[in-house]
Amino acid sequence: MTMNVHTPGFFTPEEKKQYVSLYKKLLVSLDGAYSEKELAEVKKILRKALEQKACPTTEIEIHPLLQQLYTALIVSEEIGLKRASVIAVLLYSLTEPAGAVNHSSTFRLKLKEVRKVFGEDVETIIKGLANTNQLYQKDVAIDSENFPKLLLVLAQDVRVILILITDRLCKMRLLRHAQDEKLRIKIAKEVSSLYAPLAHKLGLYSIKSELEDTSLKYTERVIYNNIAKKLNETKQSREEYIAKFIEPVSGKLKQAGLNFEIKGRTKSIASIWNKIKKQKTDFENIYDLFAIRVILDSDPDKEKSECWQVYSIITDMYQPNPKRLKDWLSIPKSNGYESLHTTVMGPEGKWVEVQIRSRRMDEIAERGFAAHWKYKGVKSESGLDDWLTNVREILESQESSPEEVMTDFKLDLYEKEIYVFTPKGDLYKLPQGSTVLDFAYAIHSDIGNHCVGGKINGKNVPIRYLLKSSDQVTILTSPNQVPKRDWLNFVRTSKARIKIKQTIKELESKSSEYGRELIGRRFKNKKIELEESILMRLIKKLGYKNITEFYADISSEKRDVNEVIDQYQELERKEKELPETIERTAEAFMSPDPAKEISSNEDTLVIGDDIKGLDYKLAKCCHPIYGDEIFGFVSSQGGIKIHRSDCKNAPALISRFGYRVVKAKWAGKAETRYPVTLHVVGHDDIGIVTNISSIISKEKNISLRSIEVNSSDGLFQGNITVFISDTSQLKHFINMIRTVKGVKLVERINF
């Protein structure tokens, strides 16, 4: 089946030819994965998009539908995903994001339509792709504060990750069409720093190598061309050497009755460049420019035994290097990679790497977790699920900064693994450099929190001890042990770091709560009425940045409770003497701490498209009240902050993070009282503070929170904070203050 294209001027003749050719290849690749009804619907949608010229433009200056077809073909042929993923690739750029309103005449699908026709699977993938695409449209750098949000989108569905990698692979193959050199370099850097490591983690080694090579081509063109030239110059001699190595091996394998394919494979340019940098040497001194691969056509129950048989035959012919044996047959990598690697001394005294695997293992090695759809199904592979769960834990933790998330993520992608065992023989895979404490947290958070050391092969070792592959580890615990901050300096795994931070925070919170209760009891025993505002000012005077530290010191007896009570009474006595002085001279009151954020899930606000009942907080920077013109802003922690439209931060938020701004309006009645601060300027009259206080006391539903005034050269200026219901009441109150004799200016503060 082919698609008829009747849109003159939309395709050039050459593009039309490419389009039809790609479409035919895609149908062959899918091999019946579509139903006839679905195929007809996809054709109908694409034809309609062509007719209405609805496809978005691409940054690399190639026809958008051609790029989509290229990507879909890679997804099907090279990754191995079929129906749902291919449909999602073809349709997601034509699908309206959830909640969006299409005011133009441009053709757009609705997500509910996609779900109805193609099912929930396709809808899920399109949602993930659309969310990610939206972030990229806002030019979000991968090292920005929004990067964790991007990762959270990635971690929702394995297929979204695989499609995103494929999309970048397609872009890199077509990047030559882009005329903008800066754009080429930008895309190449993003690919090398994020998508190549992702491909590596998922076992897509062939794609990973291609992404690294093409990235190097655009970011370090001179280096790339130089290595490529030298590889080309040595190609003939290298091929002759490979043939000389393979010939006798092939003969022996045939004699053994094995069915196999044997070939030589030159290492990628990026891999060679990394070796040159790591070994601090020249191209000519890199000996392992290629590897020999033996691929066996084995029955599933004979795979491992035949791989070891090949190993035995080759090492009988060539001397092996015992330090270079890597057995991923017995213990596969966490991304599913299985193979047997050895390095042997070949002809002319040259070291040669040999990789031995079955056809099934080779397909998984080339296509990674995607190949498990063919063999087992990706959901049965715990390695990837564990990794994605770990990513989500990092992102959802409030203890890690965006920079820490980025660092942890990159390390986790390229990390080398070690294999350690429990006393019962259970296997755990950890990154190289992990400690006994990392292992304890890998088993369970409580075991990590109470870990005091370990035993390696019966020998006691400290929690800092660096584990090695094959170690059998017994964890020693104590009920009195608790996490220490210095543990963060030596643990290697992100899971351990997150759990340590969380537990320390919980312990500090409990300690603080105990300190708060202790203070309250002592005040009550001494029959002293505790005023929170005075205590807050004392805490600040004592040099504490937050009350948690103060209460923690009370709890741990670093600060004596009785001494604090004495200091409190002294401060209270001094403050009670101040009002008389202020009434005569308008000297400054000490203002209490700023008002706390008001949060609610009552239907006081309507957010977005008439959505009620969402949790929100009123921003501290502008203190909105009922009746203000407002907007919502989705914070990096996921909550919604409500800002006034005239907030001083509004222009920056809207221009830099417009995609995180949501509509908001007040609903119902004003049932909450809000703190509002007014700035007042006037003549330094003896009774001015008294007169202002008198007005406040006469106003119903308005209560005074604080007054802070200063006088100088016959003028006073200060801030008055009151609790008020809405903007109309505020307007009335401001007008009343303006009637006070001597007041020259009253204005609401926009902090």
Image (cartoon, rainbow, N blue to C red):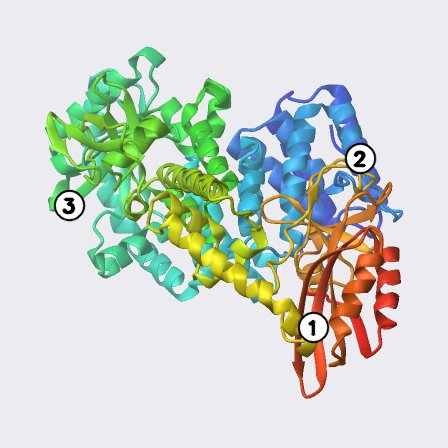
- Quadrant (top left, top right, bottom left, bottom right) of the C terminus: bottom right
Type of amino acid under label 1: Glu
Q: Which mark is residue 9?
A: none
Mark 2 vs mark 3: give the one in front.
Answer: 2
How far is disc 1 from disc 2 in space, using C-alphas? 67 Å
Does residue 559 appear anywhere in the picture?
A: yes
Q: Percent x, y for residue 664? A: 79, 48
Q: Quadrant of residue 273?
A: bottom left
- Residue on which the image places disc 2: 110
- Residue on which the image places disc 1: 583
Q: Is 549 drawn above or below residue 478 in the view shown?
A: below
**Residue shown at 44%/31% (left/top)?**
368
Q: Which mark is residue 350?
A: 3
Q: Secondary structure at mark 1?
A: helix
Q: Percent x, y for residue 506? A: 43, 38
In this rendering, would 344 be left or right of 272? left
Does residue 144 appear anywhere in the picture?
A: no
In this rendering, would 451 be left or right of 623? left
Classify mark 1: residues with Cα within 10 Å, few (<14), some (14-19) or many (20+): some
742 or 268, nearer to the observer? 742
- Which of disc 2 and disc 1 is earlier in sequence? 2
